[in-house]
Amino acid sequence: MSARPPIGFVVVLALLAEAGCGGGGGGVGEPPPPDPVIAAIEPATVWRDETTTVRILGSGTAWDPATPPLLVVGGVPGPAVVVEGPGVLRFELAVAYDADLGPRSITVQHGTDFLPAPPVTIDGPAVATWFSQPFVRGSVLVGAVAAHKPGVVVSTLSGAMSWDGTELPLFAGGPQGFVLVVPETATVGPFDLVLGGTGPSGEAAFRIPAGAVRPRTKVHDDNPVDVTLPTVDGTALHRVTATVDGLVELPILTSDVTPPIYALFPHQGPFAPPVIGLAPTRYGSAGAGPRTVALVGDTFDVVVYAGFGTYRMEVREVPAVVAGEGEPNDRVEDARPVALPALVHPAEVDADGGDDWYAVPVAPEDVGRVLRVVSSAEAGLSVAVVAADGATVLASSNSSGAGGAIDLRSTELTEAGTVYVRVGPSSFELPPPSPTTYKLFLRLEAP
């Protein structure tokens, strides 16, 4: 009969067994391994129209090169990954030139689950910002371009191109700011801005997705009309056809503190630059709104945008006597007499610097009034109202080229007799205007 162990020894063995130290142990009682997580993604930003090597850094992931995990980017299967180590994945991310900007979610397969990773953000080397929306046929869009990628500089705006290759009229105000006209016949669908500049490797051209043109649902040709912005189209398009030779005024009457912004352009032309700028002009208590010189049958479009509230668009026409330029009228002594209100047409400005002179009679009852001169927008012009001495300038203005027009008012006329209007090429440093023809409206009115 074998000896029995002391009772105290049995108690110690039992306590050790309860503590997990008996029967070989095998790591029982060690803390469990950490849950796998993805700690970072490098780089966090990728660029349009580039392929970037991206790395995902994990912890506790134990990725195996023999069985690389699956990747999901932005909710769809992503590119194949290469396992560089138990905590590092590598993949090549190709970004289309027109990819949507912003973050994309990334997840990595782990067994039957997917681990979330920090998002990767898509940015553009250069990006357009729009101050007027939406992109509807028969619109004028104001925007600017800014470089986002280090080392990228935008120096020129070359144009705008629809998806089918047709161009949209672009009226650049510098290397960054621009006005884009979307004609009523513009191709429906996406369009891009075409830019020039420099990148990290030197000269570069950029094609930026700008948006998509959509059809317009309403054209207002029943003026006067009341409109509330924003409309279904976002903007309002008014169409006006002149019924007289003279001046067409289109007051935009509103009780809003800030009137809506508008652009006026000729409906007939394939290129439709603004005629009288983009901001409303006020004269005394008169309503704000665009104005233009017209012959019977000329048709104009007014796009009203960037405003909230209700306004009324009206049409006022001022008939005038049509008178030709009357060459030779290159000196004040040979000024062409005109009876007011007058519409000078046809007329042509000399690209070599010669001026056209017009003589305007001032009756005694006209003393205290002002002379109003409005030009058409075909040519770049310099216009001045000159006193009877042929030298003293009572008012002057320049247009910045084809697409710009002059709306000028002189100081109050102090004596009866004659004043002169001098018309020449714009004094801005511009190429010779093309075409060089112009129309000129003149009338006397209250100050």
Image (tube, rainbow, N blue to C red):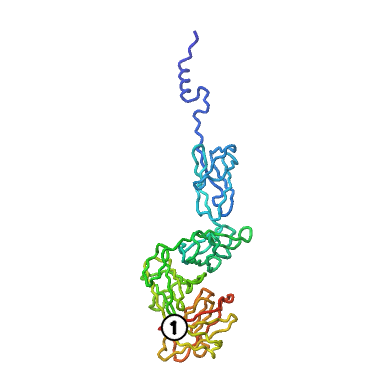
Between residue 122 and residue 445, name the one nearer to us: 445
In the image, residue 215 sits, relative to residue 302, either above or below, namely above
Q: Residue 422: percent from the left, percent from the top?
A: 52, 84
Between residue 104 and residue 181, name the one nearer to us: 181
Residue designated by label 1 = 320
The answer to whether residue 197 is left or right of residue 403 is right
Q: Classify 10 Å Cα crowding around label 1: few (below 14), some (14-19), many (20 and above).
A: many
Q: Residue 444: percent from the left, percent from the top?
A: 43, 85
In the image, residue 95 sits, relative to residue 268, either above or below, namely above
In the image, residue 357 sits, relative to residue 68, either above or below, namely below
Between residue 350 and residue 45, name the one nearer to us: 350
- Find the residue positioned furthest to the front: 297
Q: Residue 428: percent from the left, percent from the top?
A: 56, 76
- Find the residue positioned furthest to the right: 202
In the image, residue 407 sits, relative to residue 392, either above or below, namely above
User: What's under tag 1, amino acid-wise?
Assistant: Ala
